[in-house]
Image (cartoon, rainbow, N blue to C red):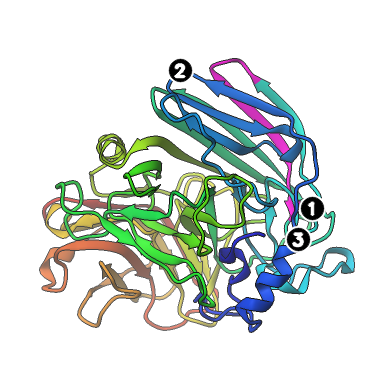
Amino acid sequence: MRTILQQTRPTPGGDGDPRRSQSRTWIALLLASLISGSITAAEQMTFLDNGEVRIGMDLALGGAVTHLSSRDRPANLINSADLGRQIQMSHYSGPWPFEPDGKKPDPAWAGLGWNPIQTGDCKGNPSRVLEHRNTGGELYIRCIPMQWPLNNVPGDCVFETWTTLEGPLVHMRFRCTSQRSDHTAYRASPQELPAVYTVSTLWRLMSYTGEKPFTGAALTHVTNNWHAPWPWTRFTATENWAALVGDDGWGLGVFKEDTTEFHGGIHGDGRSSNPKAGSTAYVAPIHRENFDHNIVYDHETTLMVGRLEDLRLRFNGLARKSPPAWQFTTNRQHWTLHHAQDEGFPLQGEWRVVFGVQKPRLEGPAQCWRAEQAGTVLLELRHQGKPSRARLSWKRLGEEEAAAPQHIDFDLAPTDTAKEYRVDLSSSPGYRGLITGLTFEPIAEPQPGGRISIRSISLVAGR
């Protein structure tokens, strides 16, 4: 069974709220999934082992991670009950449903749209490894993924992974090279970076989700209701990590430096250490992305096996604690585009956005910083259109969108060359505490055909 995160993806044309998912009942989806994605291929394992941690990829299953263990606890922590689990790459875009050459997706998964995953598809067809190298220090895999919702349809993209070990840490670098013939600019979709499924004895999903990251404040046990139509919990990990641990506080941690959005939880009432058991635990760091037809999408994630307190200490040492700065040289830096279009991937030194008949909105990624450490936003951009009143707004912890007083308006003048705008956020009484996201609306009223070209957006101290 592929887990419910994918089963409850928003329906075509939805607003991104996972609660607006397929109308099928959870029981029907569960029954459908129990007969899909079973593993029949013989294992072809390749391992890295530095004496502290051991990781194994199955070359018969697209090179997805099917084994992870430590020196002190050699039992495998990764669940592989079907082709939709493991530790694996998984990407999403439109259309919804995705019907290449008229082929219909499994009805239970039609709402996922375009969804290549590393291991295989819901009918049990595995992905194909094109190339692999294991030097003993680095493990490289290149594969053609499969479209999960369809029967034996290869993904129109290439997946690559590079894996190295550093003490108890597993550093993984991922790349998806999209090669789609469909050039439609679809709405932004969540990406699993990567999807991580463990044995269900690691049932406690732990993270720091509070206002005071990196201070040693108490951790949160993130709970979920796997019987619900949306069974996973979406949460803000303000220290950029989450862990699945057992009753003794030992398990697997996942750290991603450039996002605070994570999804996860436990599936099934039973608890089992069997990697083939139906019950499982899940966690994934998430970015929402406009996934271009030709995008070369790179990201990195670090894993660690150990005790919860050791995971937190090591991950907090890796974390970047300075306010974020985004340079739009070759890509969107995880910002997403709404009610407008841009020139696509790759960017040519700046993010060139073309306005349509609606007011455009540019949303920054899920990241955290303290207001008192970053009171000013610097924007380097050129505006080609009518004079306009722009708006910067921000979210605070626990908010889905900015509250009414959480914005600053400023004037944008048309220019042929880039200009720096310095916006004092600290002048607003609503700019305080832990900030979790930024939104930029360059114009107050629609300006069809107008343009804005953004080179950088940076948060800095002072005014």
Q: The magenta stretch spans which residues?
A: 134-147
Q: Is residue 377 left or right of residue 242?
A: left
Question: Image quadrant for the N terminus?
Answer: bottom right
In 3D space, how far apart are the residues under numbered discs 3 and 1 (Cα atoms)? 7 Å
Mark 3–mark 1 CB contact (< 8 Å): yes
Q: Secondary structure at mark 1?
A: loop
Q: Quadrant of residue 341?
A: bottom right
Q: Quadrant of residue 211?
A: bottom left
Q: Secondary structure at mark 3?
A: loop
Question: Image quadrant for the C terminus?
Answer: bottom left
Is 187 in front, or is 31? 31
Q: On the image, numbered disc 3 is attached to which residue?
A: 36
On residue 186, which mark appears? Answer: none
Q: Give the percent coordinates (x, y) of residue 257.
A: 36, 44
Kind of residue indicated by mark 3 = Ser
Q: Is residue 149 above or below residue 52?
A: below
Q: Give the percent coordinates (x, y) of residue 145.
A: 73, 46
Q: Secondary structure at mark 2?
A: loop
Q: Give the percent coordinates (x, y) of residue 280.
A: 54, 55
Q: Is residue 268 left or right of residue 443?
A: right
On residue 51, which mark appears? Answer: 2
